[in-house]
Every structure is written in C-alpha cells, then in structure tokens.
Image (spheres, helix red, strand yellow):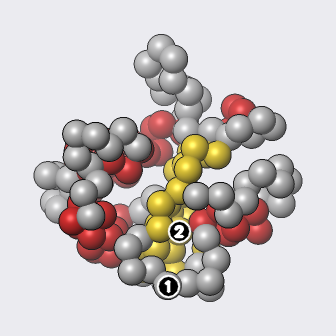
Amino acid sequence: MPQLVAPTVQLADSFRAAMADFAAEGRGGPDDDSALGSAIAEFGGRWHTEQGIAEFIERLHAAADPATPVPPGWTHVTSYWWAEGDQFLGSIELVPAVLDSAGLIGYDVAPGCAVAATPAQCCGRRCRSWPAWVSTAR
C-alpha cells in the first residue's frame, strides 16, 4: 500500500523516471510556476547524478527545518514523497505553520501512476490530527 515517506535517495531511480515523464508533459517550462516546475527547472539537469539528487533532497529537508532561513514572503514547507516499495508515485507539500487554515500547497501524482489513493488521502491517514481539508482536491 502506498505511504508517505521523507524524500530519500532510495527512491532516486523511480523519482528520476517520474520527473522525466513530467518534463515530457511540459512541466518545468517557463510558464510553470508550480513547486514541481521550479524543481525541474532548477535541478532537472543535475539530479541524474548522485550528487545532484542528494543536493535536491537536502534542499527539500532544509525547507522544512525552522532553523533554515527562508526568503522574505516565504515560509517553511514540508515535502513528503508518496511511495510504494521502491517506486516513487508522487509528492505532497505542506506548510505546517498554517495547517489550521490553508497548509496544503499541493501534490503531484507521477504520470502513469494507477493506484487507488492520492497523496493527500495518505496524508490524512498518516496524520489523523490534521484538519479535514487535507483532501483529494487537485
């Protein structure tokens, strides 16, 4: 059954394949201002290397760390990867500081992924204290 996990290099191969599929769909282009689009634009040319994927994952972990400074107008964000075994299925980004009002930034499901639940539904199962708005809205 799919579950939410911290971003990890153990999912690097399937993550890279999903990102290539997203890029083939046009994600990461100049008009894509999503978190996924920004990641593809910034790291897409580097995460095929062990160092590049490690830097990307470190950036995700740092973005959740309250000790890490964020640019003005930004807040900390926690990223989870949706996985089953060694398969990256998608990702979800949450803003813990505003969970009471609008803490779900969004989620992406890997192209071709055919499983019954979404990352947001898994998020609700993992963190039962999170509010009901963590739903299937996409």
Q: Is residue 21 left or right of residue 83?
A: left
- What residue occupies the far top of the structure in this picture? 72
Q: Residue at x 20, y 53 (%)?
A: 44
Front: mark 2 or 1: 1
Q: Which residue is mark 1?
A: 114
Quadrant that contains the C terminus: bottom right
Quarter of the rendering containing residue 100: top right
Q: Give the secondary structure at mark 2.
A: strand
Count numbered badges in the picture.
2
Q: Residue at x 56, y 65 (%)?
A: 5
Q: Is residue 62 left or right of residue 3?
A: left
Quadrant that contains the N terminus: bottom right
Q: Give the secondary structure at mark 1.
A: loop
Counting from the top left corner in percent of width and height, residue 92 is at 55, 56
Q: Is residue 100 or residue 58 the one in the foreground? A: 100
**Mark closest to the chain's N terminus, 2 or 1:** 2
* Residue type marked 2: Trp
Identify whether 15 is placed above or below 86.
above
Q: Residue at x 26, y 49 (%)?
A: 28
Q: Residue at x 32, y 43 (%)?
A: 32
Q: Is residue 48 visible?
A: yes
Counting from the top left corner in percent of width and height, residue 57 is at 37, 51
Task: Give the Cα separation between the discs numbered 2 and 1.
Answer: 13 Å
The dot on residue 89 is none
Q: Which residue is mark 2?
A: 82
Question: Mark 2, residues whose alpha carbon is within 10 Å: few (<14), some, or many (≥20)?
Answer: many
Identify whether 56 is placed above or below 70.
below
Q: Is residue 3 or residue 106 the one in the foreground? A: 106
Q: Is residue 126 left or right of residue 92?
A: right
Counting from the top left corner in percent of width and height, residue 107 is at 53, 56
